[in-house]
Amino acid sequence: AVLAVAWAANVAVDYAIAEPPNYSQIEPGLYLGGSVPRPPRGVTAVLNLCEVEDRYTAEVHSWQPIADAAPAPDLAWLRRQVDFVREHRTAGRAMFVHCHAGVSRSAMVTAAFLMADRGLTRDEALRRLREVRPQVRPNPAFMERLTEWERELRSAPSRACRT
């Protein structure tokens, strides 16, 4: 009995001082974050934007490495990532979009998805992300790409994302 109490106390202390997971739930079934040893519970689709492959696999796993620097990937690349997220969200899969820190690259793609799927402006999408992940801060090149994405969505909504 004493050992059980001591074990439970150790577990409680470990839990209390453990770092929180490096991801945030943006909405049910959509997570944004950084590198982690395993994806959030229930996730079956992963989009990795890191320059390093994940050490785990998921039912659906896409590795699209980009640097967190200028130049930003072009709009065609961004459209493919948004289409990937939309395809798997529509199929009912929980999605984890991540990069190294979950601040810039993954935030750009997740914001672009929210813009296309929810009809948000760039600033509205970023505000929504920051409500649950305050550290979101796409680099200046990615911010400019999101501005271009917003213009494209406004000018040709039917072409912006293919479902």
Image (tube, helix red, strand yellow):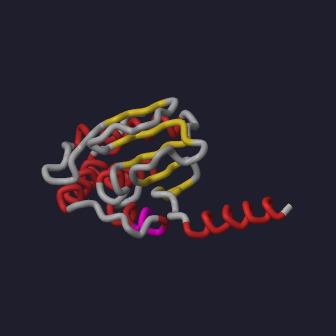
The quarter in which the N terminus is drawn is bottom right
Q: 101 and 80: which one is in front?
A: 101
Magenta stretch: residue 63 in it?
Answer: no
Q: Magenta-highlighted stretch: main secondary structure?
A: helix
Q: In this view, which residue lies farthest toward the left? A: 71
Q: 13 and 6: which one is in front?
A: 6
Q: In this view, which residue lies farthest toward the top? A: 59
Q: In this view, which residue lies farthest toward the front? A: 2
Task: Kindly identify the residue that appears in the image at 54 percent across and 64 percent down.
Answer: 18
Task: Kindly identify the residue that appears in the image at 47 percent across and 46 percent down.
Answer: 37
With 131 as the anchor, is 2 left or right in this view?
right
Q: Give the image location of residue 55, x and y in percent.
A: 42, 37
Q: In this view, which residue lies farthest toward the right? A: 1
Q: 67 and 130: which one is in front?
A: 67
Q: Is residue 159 visible?
A: no
The span shown in magenta is 127-131
With 104 as the anchor, is 91 left or right in this view?
right
Task: Kindly identify the residue that appears in the image at 78 percent across and 60 percent down.
Answer: 3
Magenta stretch: residue 130 in it?
Answer: yes
With 36 as the anchor, is 137 left or right in this view?
left
Question: Total number of numbered labels?
Answer: 0
The quarter of the picture where residue 4 lies is bottom right
Q: Give the image location of residue 2, x and y in percent.
A: 82, 64
Q: Is residue 132 above or below residue 51?
A: below
The quarter of the picture where residue 142 lies is bottom left
Q: Is residue 159 above or below residue 35?
A: above
The quarter in which the C terminus is drawn is top left
Q: Give the image location of residue 36, x and y in percent.
A: 44, 49
Q: Give the image location of residue 125, x and y in percent.
A: 39, 61
Q: Is residue 138 visible?
A: yes
